Amino acid sequence: KKAFPSDYRCGYVSIVGRPNVGKSTLLNHILGQKLSITSRKPQTTRHRILGIVSRDLVQAIYVDTPGIHGEERKAINRYMNRAATSALRDVDVILFVVDALKWTTDDELVLEKLQKTALPVILVINKVDTVDDKAALLPAIEKLSKRMNFADVLPVSALRGHNVDELHATVGKRLPLSPPFFDEDQITDRSQRFLAAEMVREKIMRQLGEEIPYELTVEIEEFKQEGKLLRISACILVEREGQKKIVIGDGGSRLKLIGTEARLDMVKLFDRKIMLSLWVKVKGGWSDNERALKSLGYSS
Ligand code: GDP
Ligand code: K
Ligand code: MG
């Protein structure tokens, strides 16, 4: 077994904040690889997902979470809030991500949860690339700093990578001395099947209008290694017949585009040739049915 130096640091870092502040984009940039799916839509991230970064005698295990939000009407939303709230416990450092230009009641909700924790919280002010006058950020930072005692405050751009390495270095210093928990070449706790389903869901989230994505899920039906080729077959589950038509598009055009883009992501992620087939099925009521959620792997 490999011996690690006694000054090795390792620990968990959760990334919390309301939907759409850029949590998953930030994780992907730190990892240097797209792992967690992103889009302009809230509720893109539905599951807790680990992104593991091992370098310079530090292993930081980032926990990307669905955003914490006020709306808990449907079972899927309650599931997502549970997944996000549990990330406030059993970690070593918390990154509280906010949008440099926009503070909402959902941010307020997250702040209230954070005020109760004794863990170090680093305030990450994201999307600074959208702010022309950087000095304008100072009053907002000062106001927030009065609300709780942040371990650090860092303005970043997750999209452009501005200050992202600095953030990772800041995190590293706060992790406890410990040998790594995971293999140093492992980047996530999630299976390739799970990641494949997520890549398909991302394309749908990005391509479809407001009405559909929240009510849709992707199931991998086949995931088979055949020599140098990965054969993947995925089924997109929607709630209504009309939604099925929209996902498929005129003459299958939209489904084809979803497949083409998802396949490219899979080639990068798995470093293999990919044969991807997609299907669409109607499965009513899954997003509001606790048992159906469990059968689809949404167990917290
Ligand atoms: P999450 O819901 O917090 O995980 O947010 P996402 O990572 O899915 O990002 C939400 C949207 O914000 C996406 O369209 C991202 O491209 C965009 N975004 C994320 N970070 C930045 C940033 O630093 N600058 C800008 N301009 N957009 C960003
Ligand atoms: K999002
Ligand atoms: Mg996300």
Image (cartoon, rainbow, N blue to C red):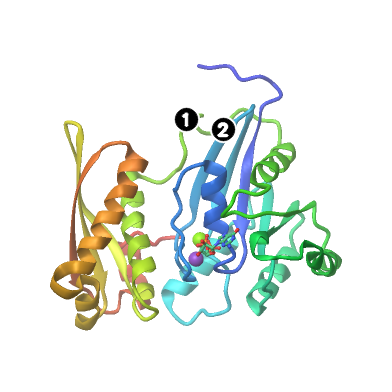
Secondary structure type for disc 1: loop
Q: Position of residue 212 (x, y in %)?
A: 34, 77
Between 94 and 265, the residue placed more toward the observer is 265
Between 161 and 179, the one nearer to me in the picture: 161
The residue singled out by tag 1 in the image is 185
- Name the spot of residue 22 as percent of width and height, x first: 57, 61
Q: Residues within 10 Å of mark 1 (few under 14, many from 20)?
A: few
Using the rendered image of the protein, determine whether residue 15 is visible from the camera's viewpoint: yes
Q: Which image quarter has ligand 1?
A: bottom right
Residue sitting farthest toward the left: 251
Circle 2: element type: strand
Marks 2/1: CA–CA distance: 7 Å
**On the picture, is 20 further left or further right than 95?**
left
Name the residue rendered at 36%, 81% in the picture: 211
Tell me if mark 2 has few (under 14), some (14-19) or many (20+) residues whose alpha carbon lies within 10 angstroms of its own: some
Amino acid carrying mark 1 in the image = Asp
Where does label 2 land, which residue? 54
Q: Position of residue 6 (x, y in %)?
A: 69, 21
Q: Are marks 2 and 1 in contact (CB under 8 Å)?
A: yes
Q: Is disc 2's CB within 8 Å of ligand 3?
A: no
**Position of 124 relative to 59 (above/below):** below
The amino acid beneath tag 2 is Ser
Which quadrant of the structure image shows residue 270?
top left
